[in-house]
Image (cartoon, rainbow, N blue to C red):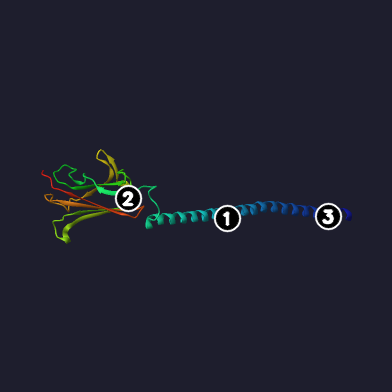
Amino acid sequence: MDGKVITVKTLNILLAGCLLAITAGCDGQKAKPAISEKVVLQQQNAQLKKQIDTYKTENAELQKRLSTLTVTGKADTKDIYDLKKVELTKYTNFYDHDKDGKKEKLIAYLKPTDSQGDIIKAAGEVNIQLWDLNQNDSAALLMQWNIPADKLGEKWFSAILGTNYRFAFDITDKVKDFSKPLTVKATFKDRLSGKTFFSQKVIEPKAD
């Protein structure tokens, strides 16, 4: 009986040991994937960080080149376009769009061209001014409008009258008398070369 009891105890101990070994083995197998996944994530994170650093370097270089083109104008821009003139066209005038007998709109047409006389959709900033040069200096400037470079592309216009930038301004409350000449002045600052172009047009009164 004692031998049998000892054998049973021994078996119990052996069984317990096996269970512990199996449990430990299972836990170890579960832990390994967690460690591997962590390593993979670390590697992926390192790769992404490296790519971001590369993109930052490339972007900084591009910004440097753009700054050189825009600010210094030292680079040769003729391969892109050769802007030579920006002028107000003959169609720049006052218009009565609602046909009520009152001119409520100033529409300015601005045409950029290259050395060959071809029209270019040049990027830049525009300032349009309306003057009454018969007034004294303090009252001569009637109205003015600024069009930033990021909004200029929206003003590109193509129709029977031609292809150019088209700007429509409300002058209802400012201009009442169209019986005398009024002058429109335009300033165009080219975004690529940094050059500034000027143009003006006198709008003569018309008999109704």
Callout 1: SS: helix
Which sits earlier in the primary sequence, circle 1 or circle 3?
3
Q: CA distance from mark 2 to mark 3?
A: 89 Å
Callout 1 touching callout 3 (CB < 8 Å): no
Looking at the image, is mark 1 or mark 3 nearer the viewer?
A: 1
Label 1 sits on residue? 46
The quarter of the displayed image where residue 120 is located: top left
Location of residue 32 in the rendering, given as x and y in whole percent from the top left corner: 67, 53
Instruction: Tell me the number on the disc at residue 157.
Output: none
Name the amino acid type tagged 2: Lys
Quarter that holds the N terminus: bottom right
Q: Residues within 10 Å of mark 3 (few under 14, many from 20)?
A: few
First-in-chain label (2 vs 3):
3
Name the residue carrying label 3. 10
**Is 123 in front, or is 78?**
78
**Quarter assignment of residue 75:** bottom left
When asked about the image quadrant of residue 164, the answer is: top left
Compute the Cα span from label 1 to label 2: 40 Å
Q: Secondary structure at mark 2?
A: helix
Q: Name the residue beneath numbered marker 2.
A: 151
